[in-house]
Image (cartoon, grey):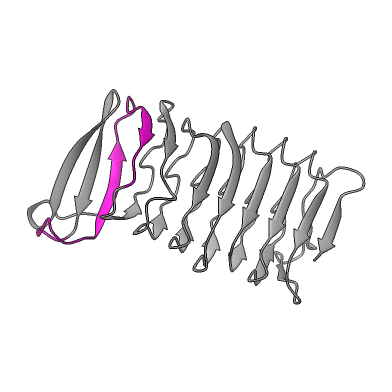
Amino acid sequence: DAFDRDNSAFHLAEQGNGVLLYANKSSDATVSSWCLSKATLNASGSVPADGRVTSIGSGAFSGCAGITSFDFAGARSLHVIGDAAFFDSGLAGGIVISGNVFSIGDGAFTSCQALESVHIEGSRMDELGMAVFSGCSSLARVTFGAACAITAEAFADCPNLVSVSLPASLEDLWTGAFNRCPSLASVTVRGPVPPRLGFYWGSPFSFGEGLPEGFRVVLA
């Protein structure tokens, strides 16, 4: 997002060895609609929840190898995680994304090599962006409370991904979401109505190329 310097409010906060920049399109700093806009590359440690933050800007933590965790579960006002927000960052272990988040942008968590598990709580999730968790080499498990659409390459190139449980609310699953996931034994689709399968003109739908022999889809 673009911010008008003269009509916006800004705030800096220390984060480990670096700094976080918060921005508010309203010049009234009391308005609870802040964007965690950018971290310096030397920012480090665990980022605490801030109840005022409604969005994380595109590329906010991109390349921040020292950022090891973010309190998503505690960020109850957070609605949007921007494109490449945590691209190639040091997020490690498991993350739980609050049910108030309704949009996660393209490549938001691409190449988070130490990320091991993801749970998306919510009831409001509209769409996971293109390649949102692609290239997460340690990612093993993904579960959802809700999601309406999962786009192409969402979980591509995750060699240790062994299980995915898709929510009953899923309406659209795009081709190639699990490309080159050689350890993925199964995808569980919950609910009475399976999702629509999206594909590109001239190409048939596929859960992914490079899946292991015996890969199966479980309808639960």
Q: Is residue 5 left or right of residue 166?
A: left
Q: Position of residue 29 (x, y in %)?
A: 12, 55
The magenta segment is: 26-49
Q: Would residue 131 be seen by someone viewing this image from the given angle?
A: no
Q: Quadrant of residue 150?
A: bottom right
Instruction: Tell me what residue is drawn at x 34 percent, y 46 percent.
Output: 49
- View extreme (left): residue: 6
Q: Position of residue 195 (x, y in %)?
A: 71, 71
Q: Quadrant of residue 27?
A: bottom left
- Label total for image: 0
Q: Is residue 182 magenta?
A: no
Q: Position of residue 13 (x, y in %)?
A: 21, 36
Quarter the C terminus occupies: bottom right
Q: Is residue 30 magenta?
A: yes
Q: Is residue 3 left or right of residue 198?
A: left
Q: Would residue 11 be seen by someone viewing this image from the given angle?
A: yes
Instruction: Tell me what residue is drawn at x 38 percent, y 48 percent.
Output: 58
